[in-house]
Image: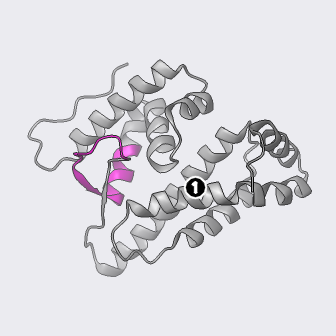
Amino acid sequence: MTAPPPEAVTRLLEAWSSGDLRARDELMPIVYSELRRRAAAHLKRERPGHTLRPTDLLHEAYLRLCAQNAGFKNRDHFFGVASQLMRRILVDHARARSAAKRGKALRVTLSEDVAAASPPADLLGLDAALDELAALDEREAQVVELRFFGGLTLPETARVLGISLATAKNDWAHAKAWLFARLDPSSSSLPRPPRN
């Protein structure tokens, strides 16, 4: 099946955002394989033997997308929102598992295939660090969510956030450095705050 042009997806998203449920039903088969690919990418960064499968993560995200109907601007915005929902699902799952295991750390790596040598971090720690980063620099936290959790490219991330590609690259590099410093248990120095 050939992917439709982004403009066709955007038209369906706009119709769905306006309340057309037939557009939503027409859209989902079109974006299903891309959402499943992104769900699989999320789960590759999780611990071995994770109880969620890509299809489970995708279906939970789909249910939340249908309930949310966030007024999607375009294809990139839709996948960005889907990524944020997948992050929330994984964090909720990790919290539930952590509570059941009474505090055993769940490990993920903050690599996203961009930085090969990244310090390990637990998903709950990463979530807390992203919340800290968002309090200091919301856009940088959004860049990390879209790139790491959403699997968006830098150009897609820039389009979703309405920023230049150069700004997206700078934010991505700076946010990764801040998060690595914040999450690295061997780091003796305090993480530097994001630039203003």
Say which residue appears at 72% left-offset and 46% top-offset: 70
Which of the 4 image quarters holds residue 187? Answer: top left
Say which residue appears at 61% left-offset and 65% top-offset: 58
- The answer to whether 174 appears left or right of 42 in the picture is left
User: Disc 1 residue type?
Assistant: Leu
Nearer-the-camera pick, 153 or 80: 153
Figure coloring: one colour
Mark 1: few, some, or many residues within 10 Å (few <14, many ≥20)?
A: many
Q: Position of residue 143 (x, y in %)?
A: 47, 35
Disc 1 target residue: 85
- The answer to whether 165 appears left or right of 120 in the picture is right
Q: Quadrant of the C terminus?
A: top left
Which of the 4 image quarters holds residue 80? Answer: top right
Q: Position of residue 16 (x, y in %)?
A: 84, 49
Q: Position of residue 81 (x, y in %)?
A: 62, 47
Give the residues in magenta: 113-130
Please say whether residue 75 is one of the residues in the magenta stretch. Answer: no
Nearer-the-camera pick, 191 or 21: 21
Q: Quadrant of the N terminus?
A: bottom right
- The answer to whether 26 appears left or right of 55 in the picture is right
Q: Which residue lies most toward the bottom here?
A: 100
- The answer to whether 128 appears left or right of 165 in the picture is left
Q: What is the count of numbered marks?
A: 1
Q: Which residue lies most toward the front here?
A: 1
Q: Is residue 42 above or below residue 96?
A: above
Q: Is residue 68 above or below residue 159?
A: below
Q: Position of residue 35 (x, y in %)?
A: 62, 57
Say which residue appears at 71% left-offset and 54% top-offset: 31
Q: Is residue 175 above or below residue 124?
A: above
Say which residue appears at 69% left-offset and 60% top-offset: 32
Mark 1 falls on what kind of element? Answer: helix
